[in-house]
Amino acid sequence: MNKVRIGIVGIGNMGYTHAQNILAGKITRLELAAVADTNPAKLARVPQVKGFKTAQEMMASGLIDAILIATPHYDHTTIGIAALKAGLHVMVEKPISVHRADCERLIAAYKGREKKQVFAAMFNQRTDRYYQKIRELIQSGELGEIRRVNWIITNWFRTHAYYASGGWRATWAGEGGGVLLNQCPHNLDLFQWMFGMPVTLTAKCSFGKYHDIEVEDDVTAMMEFKNGATGVFITSTGEAPGTNRLEITAERGKLVYEDDKLTYTRNEIPMGEFSRTTTESFSRPATWDVSIPAAGHGGQHNEVLQNFTDAILDGKKLIAPAPEGIHSVELANAMLLSGWTEKPVSLPIDGRKYERLLKAKIAESAKKGKKKAVKEAAPVDFSKSFGK
């Protein structure tokens, strides 16, 4: 095989964007062979290739070697399992599933297929050179042991029109959550990719604080890690202009990423060592101010698709293996679970318990019988919508 024939299921904003990039030849050796969507108007957006009403029809057609799943969130699990069982290579948009239990089902379907099939997730921000540099500084030990992490990521502003653009959006039944399940999977993935998973978490979630929706649009979470370090994660779709500031306090100093600048205030002597050895009461370690360069934001969605293609054809290591997607989903689930119960949550969470609570939310919503007004919008390039 010298090229990969891919089919896209779900021709909404992201699916349409991926289709246009592939058709434009931006990913070498990747050919768009088919698309699938239950909505004929969305199929008509991509007239260049064969269109199917369902993913199942497309998978059975023999036209594709791989599938890109860009449907509403719950379908990621069912279509992903079917595609893996059909022997296809699979790329799934974020989040890989809505909740931990579904992640486990999806990952279980991949077990034993690792040598034959490539299974990846669209965590495009892992290609961002700034986050790659931060991770490198952590993993190399340059920062020393981390003591505190603060991430304010509130530049995910969304309007009322955005939430009215799809009946599935911002509902427990259609999306399974709000900012944590739609916008923040990127940041939650980066968070665990850089810092690992916390052991406990407490969150305050506000549901419909800024919009007429039933799910969360504002979240503040506090975490504790195994080594005693703490983390604060704040996000919202209701603040403008919003902030994206990541601050890491570690033994060797403080690292701040904001406004495309990565600055490191480095202690000449690690803070714990200085505190234990100095005879002065009010002194602090001398510091160096270091500006750390990074080569832009990387290739984002197209780089992940190129990597997926290269993994299939050449065995290249994946940027974002799909099984790792369970971690960002679990962080989102834990925050919602803490918000619902108003109690701290230990990780890993009980995935089945969370699933039962989510189903109760869906049933409660259905009982209220409130219909959401939907105004179908023209397709937009959502690759430009992620927070930087």
Image (cartoon, helix red, strand yellow):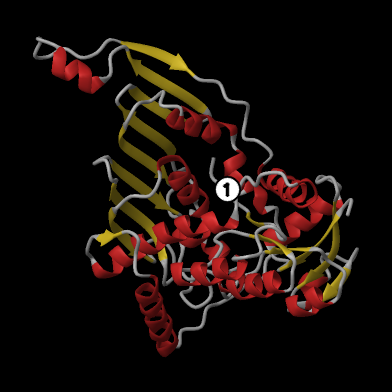
Residue 53 picture location, percent across and down: 78, 79
**Picture quadrant where residue 238 is located:** bottom left
Task: Residue at 39%, 66% (x, y): give it.
Answer: 208
Tell me if 35 is positioned left or right of 279 in this view.
Answer: right
Please, is residue 251 above or below residue 281 in the view? below
**Residue 251 at x, y percent in the picture:** 29, 25
Q: Does any portion of residue 97 appear in the rendered image?
A: yes
Inspect this view and state whether residue 240 appears: no
The residue depicted at 34 percent of the width and 69 percent of the height is 350
Lateral position of residue 286 relative to residue 157, left or right? left
Q: Amino acid at mark 1?
A: Phe
Q: Is residue 237 left or right of residue 373?
A: left
Query: Quarter holding the N terminus?
Result: bottom right
For label 1, the crowd category at 10 Å Cα-Cα, with few meaning under 14, some 14 to 19 and many 20 or more, is some
In percent of the image, x 59 and y 57: which residue is there? 322
Q: Quadrant of residue 255?
A: top left
The residue closer to the viewer here, 141 or 94, is 141
357 lies above or below 369: above
Disc 1 on helix, strand or loop?
A: loop
Q: Please tell me which residue lies in front, 254 or 142.
A: 142
Taking the spot 36% from the left edge, 32% from the top edge, the residue there is: 248
In percent of width and height, residue 163 lies at 54, 66
Q: Quadrant of the C terminus?
A: top right
Q: Which residue is mark 1?
A: 386
Residue 331 versus residue 195 in the image, above or below: below
Question: Residue 223: horizontal and vertical position, in percent?
Answer: 29, 49
Query: In this figure, what is the number of numbered marks?
Result: 1
